[in-house]
Image (spheres, rainbow, N blue to C red):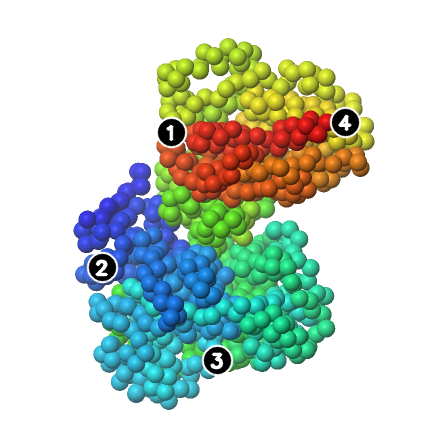
């Protein structure tokens, strides 16, 4: 019997939902959850829509899916299959039972290299399949930009495509067989020539041959409605291909046999520039004659968004619209010949080959992150999906884009179109005001549907119609065709159990909209300047594209989201938390931002801030957590850890009066076991070893900061030793002083009495944080406003100065001065600060050093690690750089209830890297949390970069 959860903390569950959950739990082996928090997590996908399910269940196998369907039919309750939840049209949400197959039904069951097929469960993530078969030179052809989290079942449901569909076809073109069950409960194998498995289907097709031949399959990206052309006798009556793109309204997929294609051994990428995007579209058809692997288009609007969000983009040829083209061949010579021939037919002399694979990857990343990055307009307003992936025949694309620009102008709507130009498919997020109602959305969508139909196009080119476009199918198809959809639906699902509201008898496109239901909610503690001070706008940055669910840590492509990587639970992913917080503002499931469900959802958020950097939509869950905790506990008694670890800098000052004595008193294990739990910490953690503070050292006394020196700018830097460094690692700022002075810089010291309040911020004590930061501005402000660089020690504290400081004290001009004047040691030594090392200074030789390097999460997310990477490379060190959080995350990993997850997070990257490091390797970590975690869990003593540089400088002498 399955485990069932019917409540989350204190929120009650309706009796009918509880009964339904109990019935499912009796019938299934997988977990069943009807809690308010869980339902909120699954109430939306990557679309504009919100429909809370009654129950969420996690089937373990096909038998569980069949059992859940039987319960649904008996209870006359709808059922919706869900994979990665990245659907942009509202086709992965439903009002009844949502079955998430991504948790358990995610196995690659068999790979036949000779037949070039793979048999998979519907929850298999596409990138996992690609990695499995890459060694054999194979791949699954379609590759949507969400391939690192999209499941094969979802791709089958929506007929996903991606950039390489121009060469390898849509998902429908790459399906050999499906193990499926329809709404009546009939399980059948869908194959070519298998239409007889569904009684009446062959007869329905025969009765409508002329209609199907004239209205369906007109061009490759016509995927709106049901793809009835696959059932034509001349195309083999392919039931499997027909079911692809039916969005779970006709059958649920239990297993799939997919075709694999050969990857060309040689591939080349080039960028072509044009006056604008329609001009780029005009050049596509001649290029297609050369059979490129991919032809993607984008314009200056999206490139500017990428540059603002992630930094400089690769150099592009002159133009305002671009085509990114990939060609392939058996040899590089063959691929180059194809590229040159294609360029000759490109209609432009502005092009260049992108030979560096890393640069090419960055180029394609602009496209991959487009859906998230386009979620804001150029003036930082919200932009929305809906008219997300319309397609027209490629020969009509230029004309369509010109008309579409005129349509946007007529409606006063801004968008940043981009997409699969080789297939005539365009993506766009629209700056339609939706805070109050859906009327502007409806007006635009109706006109856009008429426009695409006038160009012989399709409302959807790869994401399905869902709740966004199903109502508009009558604009594209005749009355007879729409009636035929109804006839097909009746054969497969006469009781309308499977994903109702989509394609047949559709929901209105402006029903169930998520954004209008969330009233403006002014932030109380943070400025949220990028979101106009509105918590609702900030939370709705989450577009649901689900990059936080990707294995970015395992692939080394990012740090987000460490707790999800450890648990695999939607509760612990940035998107899931955003959905719960959104629901708290809407208030239909969860009673406000201070509710128990919200605190439960945020509990395993490490406040690592990786989402603020890795999320293409700019979600910053650490900031939202601070705001929520501030609201929840303002004027109330807080958890013990908020006073113990949350006030650690305050206690360090007290301990600093007699550090050796206090450390000696607390050293015995029996006393640690008594004191640690009282402080709200896990018994398996220990209190730190206290040292004589740096501020009392001779080095600090001799270089004590005198504000009168602020006007002397030549090679002057201020070393700011934060509270943690001052009391726990005083040897590190001493090393920094020596390294900086060796590099010819004049150093003054601010130590201990200027606290950034980082632990107050992470525990949501924002009033206290503001007091600390106001004092800090009084100490560091005079230096910053005079242009003197501030060199920090602890990355989390420097990140506060670069980011949180302006959020908490936005009206103080000194805050921006300090934020723009704060530098890491590596940034100074690599010449990124105004004060430069002397010309003859050279970084010490580290060519004999092998090191595991742990970038601190806040350094990765806020400060950047490029300078450290450059410095170590210049020094000749052999470096293994970990990807992801160490798992301690300041106070978080020490708290009761977090230890096991903290260890699991460390296993994402840190602990394996330490175990696999060659003998004699060093562990470099500038963050005190990272060094503490490695010591606690692996017995490895970490070192700060400054310590290594000082040691090697001394050896060189």
State the separation of the CA atoms marked 3 and 1.
59 Å
Total number of numbered labels?
A: 4
Residue drawn 27% across the image and 49% down it? 31
Q: Is residue 803 left or right of residue 645?
A: right
Quadrant position of residue 955: top right
Q: Is residue 897 left or right of residue 328?
A: left
Residue 478 location (% of width, % of height): 41, 82
Mark 4 packing: few (<14 Cα in 10 Å), some, or many (20+)?
some
Q: Nearer the viewer, mark 4 or mark 1?
A: 4
State the separation of the CA atoms marked 2 and 3.
38 Å
Q: Earlier in the sequence, mark 4 or mark 2?
A: 2
The answer, for residue 789, to whether it is visible in the render is: yes
> Which residue is denoted by mark 2 in the rendering?
63
Q: Nearer the viewer, mark 4 or mark 3?
A: 4
> Which residue is denoted by mark 4 in the rendering?
746
> Which residue is denoted by mark 1 in the rendering?
896
Quadrant position of residue 243: bottom left
State the separation of the CA atoms marked 1 and 2.
39 Å
Residue drawn 45% across the image and 21% down it? 687
Q: Earlier in the sequence, mark 4 or mark 1?
A: 4
Q: Earlier in the sequence, mark 2 or mark 3?
A: 2
Q: For mark 2, give the secondary structure.
A: helix
State the separation of the CA atoms marked 4 and 3.
69 Å
Q: Nearer the viewer, mark 2 or mark 3?
A: 2
Residue 592 location (% of width, % of height): 40, 41
Taking depth in this image into account, of 591 and 21 the one nearest to the observer is 21
The answer, for residue 88, to whether it is visible in the render is: no
Quadrant position of residue 201: bottom left
> Which residue is denoted by mark 3 in the rendering?
219
Mark 2 packing: few (<14 Cα in 10 Å), some, or many (20+)?
some
Residue drawn 37% across the image and 52% down it? 42
Vertical comparison of 755 with 552: above or below: above
């Amino acid at each position: 019997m399955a485990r069932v959860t019917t409540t989350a903390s204190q929120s009650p569950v309706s009796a009918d939902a509880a009964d339904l959950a109990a019935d499912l739990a009796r019938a299934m082996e997988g977990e069943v959850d009807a809690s308010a928090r869980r339902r909120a997590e699954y109430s939306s996908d990557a679309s504009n829509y919100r429909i809370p399910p009654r129950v969420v269940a996690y089937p373990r196998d096909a038998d569980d899916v069949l059992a859940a369907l039987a319960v649904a039919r008996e209870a006359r309750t709808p059922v919706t299959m869900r994979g990665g939840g990245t659907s942009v049209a509202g086709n992965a949400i439903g009002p009844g039972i949502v079955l998430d197959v991504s948790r358990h039904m995610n196995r690659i069951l068999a790979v036949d290299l000779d037949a070039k097929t793979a048999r998979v469960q519907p929850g298999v993530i596409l990138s996992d399949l690609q990695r499995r078969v890459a060694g054999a030179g194979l791949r699954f052809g379609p590759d949507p930009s969400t391939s690192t989290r999209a499941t094969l079942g979802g791709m089958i449901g929506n007929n996903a495509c991606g950039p390489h569909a121009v060469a390898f076809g849509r998902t429908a073109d790459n399906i050999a067989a499906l193990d499926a069950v329809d709404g009546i409960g009939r399980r059948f194998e869908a194959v070519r020539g298998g239409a007889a498995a569904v009684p009446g289907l062959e007869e329905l097709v025969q009765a409508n041959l002329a209609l199907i031949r004239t209205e369906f399959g007109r061009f490759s990206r016509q995927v709106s409605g049901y793809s009835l052309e696959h059932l034509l006798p001349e195309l083999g009556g392919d039931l499997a291909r027909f079911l692809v793109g039916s969005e779970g309204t006709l059958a649920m997929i239990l297993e799939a046999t997919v075709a694999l294609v050969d990857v060309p051994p040689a591939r080349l990428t080039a960028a072509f520039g044009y006056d604008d995007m329609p001009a780029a579209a005009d050049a596509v058809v001649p290029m297609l004659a050369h059979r490129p692997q991919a032809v993607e288009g984008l314009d200056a609007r999206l490139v500017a968004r990428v540059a603002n969000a992630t930094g400089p983009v690769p150099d592009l040829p002159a133009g305002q619209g671009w085509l990114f083209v990939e060609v392939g061949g058996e040899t590089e010579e063959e691929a180059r010949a194809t590229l040159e021939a294609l360029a000759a037919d490109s209609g432009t002399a502005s092009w260049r080959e992108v030979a560096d694979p890393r640069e090419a990857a960055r180029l394609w990343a602009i496209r991959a992150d487009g859906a998230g990055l386009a979620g804001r307009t150029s003036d930082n307003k919200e932009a929305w999906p809906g008219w997300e992936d319309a397609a027209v025949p490629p020969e009509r694309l230029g004309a369509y884009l010109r008309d579409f620009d005129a349509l946007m102008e007529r409606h006063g709507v801004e968008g940043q179109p981009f997409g699969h130009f080789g297939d005539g498919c365009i993506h766009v997020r629209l700056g339609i005001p939706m805070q109050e109602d859906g009327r502007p959305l409806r007006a635009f969508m109706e006109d856009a549907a008429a426009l695409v139909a006038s160009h012989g196009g399709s409302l959807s080119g790869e994401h399905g119609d869902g709740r966004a476009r199903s109502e508009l199918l009558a604009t594209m198809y005749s009355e007879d065709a729409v009636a035929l959809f109804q006839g097909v639906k009746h054969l497969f699902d006469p009781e309308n159990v499977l994903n109702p509201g989509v394609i047949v008898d559709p929901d209105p496109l402006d029903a169930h909209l998520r954004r209008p239901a969330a009233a403006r909610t002014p932030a109380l503690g943070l400025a949220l300047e990028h979101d106009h001070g509105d918590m609702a706008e900030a939370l709705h940055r989450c577009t649901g594209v689900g990059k936080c669910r990707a294995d970015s840590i395992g692939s080394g492509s990012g740090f987000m989201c460490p707790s999800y990587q450890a648990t695999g639970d939607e509760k612990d992913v940035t998107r899931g938390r955003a959905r719960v917080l959104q629901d708290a503002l809407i208030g239909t499931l969860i009673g406000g931002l201070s509710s128990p469900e919200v605190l439960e959802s945020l509990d395993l958020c490490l406040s690592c801030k990786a989402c603020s950097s890795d999320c293409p939509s700019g979600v910053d869950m650490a900031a939202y957590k601070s705001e929520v905790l501030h609201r929840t506990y303002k004027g109330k008694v807080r958890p013990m850890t908020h006073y113990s670890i949350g006030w650690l800098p305050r206690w360090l000052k007290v301990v600093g009066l007699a550090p050796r004595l206090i450390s000696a008193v607390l050293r015995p294990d029996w006393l640690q076991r008594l004191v640690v739990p009282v402080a709200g910490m896990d018994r398996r953690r220990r209190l730190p070893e206290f040292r004589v503070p740096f501020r009392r050292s001779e080095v600090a006394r001799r270089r004590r900061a005198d504000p009168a020196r602020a006007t002397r700018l030549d090679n002057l830097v201020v070393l700011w030793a934060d509270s943690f460094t001052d009391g726990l690692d005083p040897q590190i700022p001493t090393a920094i002083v020596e390294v900086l002075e060796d590099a010819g810089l004049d150093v003054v010291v601010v130590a201990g009495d200027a606290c950034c309040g980082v632990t107050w911020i992470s525990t949501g004590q924002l009033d206290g944080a503001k007091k600390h930061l106001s004092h800090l501005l009084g100490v560091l402000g005079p230096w910053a406003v005079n242009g003197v660089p501030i060199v920090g020690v602890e990355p989390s504290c420097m990140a506060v100065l670069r980011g949180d400081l302006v959020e908490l004290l936005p009206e103080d001009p000194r805050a921006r001065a300090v934020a723009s004047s704060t530098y890491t040691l590596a940034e100074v030594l690599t010449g990124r600060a105004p004060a430069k090392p002397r010309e003859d200074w050279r970084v010490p030789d580290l060519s004999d050093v092998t090191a595991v390097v742990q970038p601190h999460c806040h350094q990765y997310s806020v400060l950047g690690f490029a300078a450290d990477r450059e410095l170590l490379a210049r020094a000749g060190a052999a470096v293994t750089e970990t990807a992801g959080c160490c798992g301690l995350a300041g106070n978080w990993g020490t708290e009761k209830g977090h230890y096991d997850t903290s260890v699991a997070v460390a296993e994402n990257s840190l602990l394996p890297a330490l175990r696999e490091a060659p003998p004699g390797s060093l562990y470099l970590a500038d963050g005190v949390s990272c060094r503490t975690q490695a010591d606690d869990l692996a017995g490895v003593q970490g070192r700060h970069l400054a310590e290594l540089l000082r040691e090697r400088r001394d050896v060189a002498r």
